[in-house]
Image (cartoon, rainbow, N blue to C red):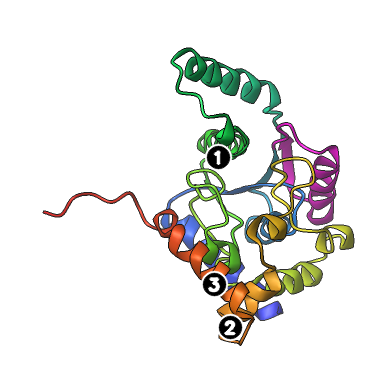
Amino acid sequence: MEQKVEEIVQWLRTQAEKANVDGLLVGVSGGIDSAVVAHLIKRAYPEHSLGVIMPCKSNPNDQDHAQKVVDSCGIQSMVIDLTETHNVMFGNIVEQLKSNETYNGAQEQIADANLRARLRMSTLYTVATNHRYLVVGTDNAAEWYTGYFTKFGDGGVDLVPLVNLTKGEVREMAQFLGVPDEIVNKKPSAGLWEGQTDENEMGTSYDMIDRHLKGESIPDKDREIIEAMHKRTAHKRDIAPGPPK
C-alpha cells in the first residue's frame, strides 16, 4: 500500500508540473473518497494543497466529518457555504419553468441534487483559478464504471487519482493514510437528500461492483444492474460528441 500511495503521489506531482500549475485542491465532503484524496494531495504538495468544504443544504454531520478529514491530514482548508446561492438559483429556475408551464415536479429532487453538485464544481474551479491549482476528483473505479457521479458536477475535474481503485482498495488506502475510523466505516452517501445512501440508490452494493470489476462471479441480478448502469451512463465518460466529418 505504501508503494501504491507513493506512485499516486508522484503521478499527481507529474500532472501538476505538466499543467504548469502551483498545486492541487479537492472538495472535501466528509466521505471516504474525498478524505483519501485530501491526504494524497497534501503529500504531493504539502504547502500548496487545499481542501474546500462546501455545505449546501447538507447534513451538519458531513461538515463535521469534513473538518475531521482536514484535521487528520493537516491540509489547508476553507469553507464556502453554497446554501443561499443554491436556493436563489434553483428557486429562480423553477419559477421560470412553472411560468412557462414546462415544470416537471417528478424531476425536482434529482435536478436539485445535480445543481448542487455543479455549483460545487464551479466553486472549485473558481478557487482553483485563483490559486493556480488543478481540481482533483474523488471518483473510484466503481463509481466511474457505473457512472455514479454528476456529469459536469463531481465528474467535472482535472484529475481522477482513484479511478483505478475499487471501493475496497480505497478503504484500505484510507486506513493506511490515517483517515478517521468513523469516516472509513460510515455508509457511503452523496448527501443528496435525507437518508440517501449510494447503495440504496444504485440497487446493488460496492462489494458486488468491486467483485464484478475483478471478474468474479456475482448474482445475475446484481450483474444486470451494474451493466445497465454502465451502458446508460456511457455519455458521462466521454467528451461531448460531434457529428462525423
Q: Position of residue 145 (x, y in %)?
A: 52, 66
Q: Which badge, 3 or 2, is on the more N-terminal residue?
A: 2
Q: Amino acid at mark 1?
A: Met
The residue labelled by disc 3 is 224
Left/right of residue 74 with respect to residue 107 in the rendered view: right
Residue 96 at least partly seen:
yes
- Quadrant of residue 234 in the image? bottom left
Q: Callout 3: helix, strand or loop?
A: helix
Q: What are the residue bounds of the magenta stretch?
A: 54-78
**Number of numbered markers:** 3
Q: CA distance from mark 3 to mark 2?
A: 16 Å
**Residue tagged 2:** 214
Q: Please tell me whether mark 2 or mark 1 is closer to you in this view.
A: 2
Q: Rate crowding at label 3 as few (under 14), some (14 to 19) or many (20 or more) other CA atoms within 10 Å.
A: few
Q: Residue at the far top: name it.
A: 99
- Are the residues at dot 3 and dot 1 in contact (C-beta closer than 8 Å)? no
Q: Amino acid at mark 2?
A: Lys
Q: Amino acid at mark 3?
A: Glu
Was residue 198 drawn as part of the magenta stretch in this picture? no
Q: Earlier in the sequence, mark 2 or mark 1?
A: 1
Does any portion of residue 39 appear in the rendered image? no
| Residue 128 image offset from top left, x and y in percent | 54, 39
Q: Is residue 173 above or below residue 124?
A: below
Residue at (79% x, 56% y) in the render: 73
Element carrying mark 1: helix
- Splitting the image into 4 quarters, where does residue 120 fall? top right
The image's mark for residue 121 is: 1
User: Which structural element holds mark 2?
Assistant: loop
